[in-house]
Amino acid sequence: MTRPAILVARAVFPEVVSRLRQHFDVEDNPTDTIFTPAQLIQRLQGKQGAFTTGSERIGAELLAACPQLRVVSNMAVGYNNFDVEALTSRGVLATNTPDVLTETTADFGFALMMATARRMAESEQYLRRGEWTKWAYDMFTGSDIHGSTLGILGMGRIGQGIARRGALGFGMRVIYHNRSRLPAETEAAVGARYVDKATLLAQADHLVLVLPYTAENHHVIGAVELAAMKPTATLTNIARGGIVDDAALAQALRDRRIAAAGLDVFEGEPALNPALLTVPNVVLTPHIASASIATRRAMADLAADNLIAALTGGVPPTPINPAVLPLRT
Ligand code: DGY
């Protein structure tokens, strides 16, 4: 019997590629070239599976050009790079990597919020520039985390992890808004109270965004929402670029409409709105919220588990569109 063929579209742990080679004919990408859409289609010819990351867009055009594709396995919890409707209508399984990154990403969201509130990046740059000549009572004064109000927009697993850290670790009052309200016992366990979006914007001292990117969530935070926040508030985005209108945010930061922002994701990343580079009151990181060694390895292992199960008659652990199972042979 011929072995299925797969593409590993980005560089990934060699041990994970070796494991995939035990099951499949593998074309990998050790030089980590970012394929253009046409190159991706060309590389996927004759492949039944693809190991992808958020940088590979899998849409209707690609699927039409790769009719033998059976499964796309994203090494990410977010899957806005997938057209799930097109995948499902073609009977192609999509999988992602939830759960394994929850705590690591919540750690990072909390750290980015703290770095933003306490002006860590701005003060470090000042020090590196050799400008620190004396202590001053108001030097880089920021805002407190403990005892303040934490607002969370999007209350899935990662949002709940951040809520727990805030409520239990830092004595924060935690409020959240989400498409659907959590059960009362979950709210109690994470120490968070449901509010409408207007209340969230008006009351949060530190607003953290943890919602998935969808067409409805495009620019959920724009000029109007920023104007509704406290001028002393911070905004942290670890969700996805496009949820925030980055141009409006850069303007709000310049005008001190809000105090500061921490951004791990950007519209059009890895490019970013150049205006964000010219404002001092923003902490910028290159989409690394899940980037601990252990968690990235767990994500790669889970993405491999999904591919192996899907193409060898097993049960993929974390399918996005399980309705397509069992897969066509
Ligand atoms: C995810 O898992 O969605 C993270 O953003 C990493 O891409």
Image: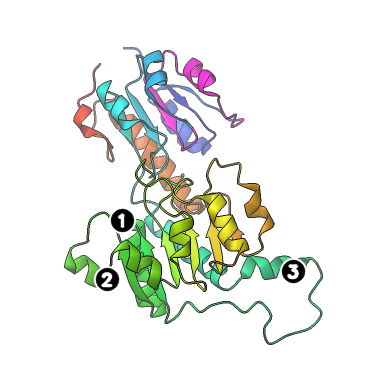
Say which quadrant the N terminus sits in.
Answer: top left
Earlier sequence position, callout 1 versus callout 2: 1
Which residue shows up at 43% across the image and 62% down it? Answer: 208
Which of 88 and 292 lies nearest the eye of the viewer? 88
User: Can I make out residue 5 in this image?
Assistant: no
Where is mark 3, residue-wise? Answer: 126
Where is mark 2, residue-wise? Answer: 193
Residue 329, quarter of picture: top left
1 and 2 marks in contact (CB < 8 Å): no
Alpha-carbon span between mark 1 and mark 2: 14 Å
Residue 268, image x, y percentages: 54, 40
Earlier sequence position, callout 3 versus callout 2: 3
Local SS, label 1: loop
Q: Is residue 155 magenta?
A: no
Could you tell me the amino acid type at mark 2? Arg
Could you tell me the amino acid type at mark 3? Tyr
Local SS, label 2: strand
User: Can I make out residue 213 in this image?
Assistant: yes
Q: Is residue 252 left or right of residue 57?
A: right
Q: Is mark 1 within 8 Å of ligand 1?
A: no
Over which residues does the magenta segment extend? 31-55
Where is mark 1, residue-wise? Answer: 156
**Residue neighbourhood size for the residue with mark 3, other residues' Cα within 10 Å, grouped as few (<14), some (14–19), many (≥20):** few
Residue 227, image x, y percentages: 47, 63
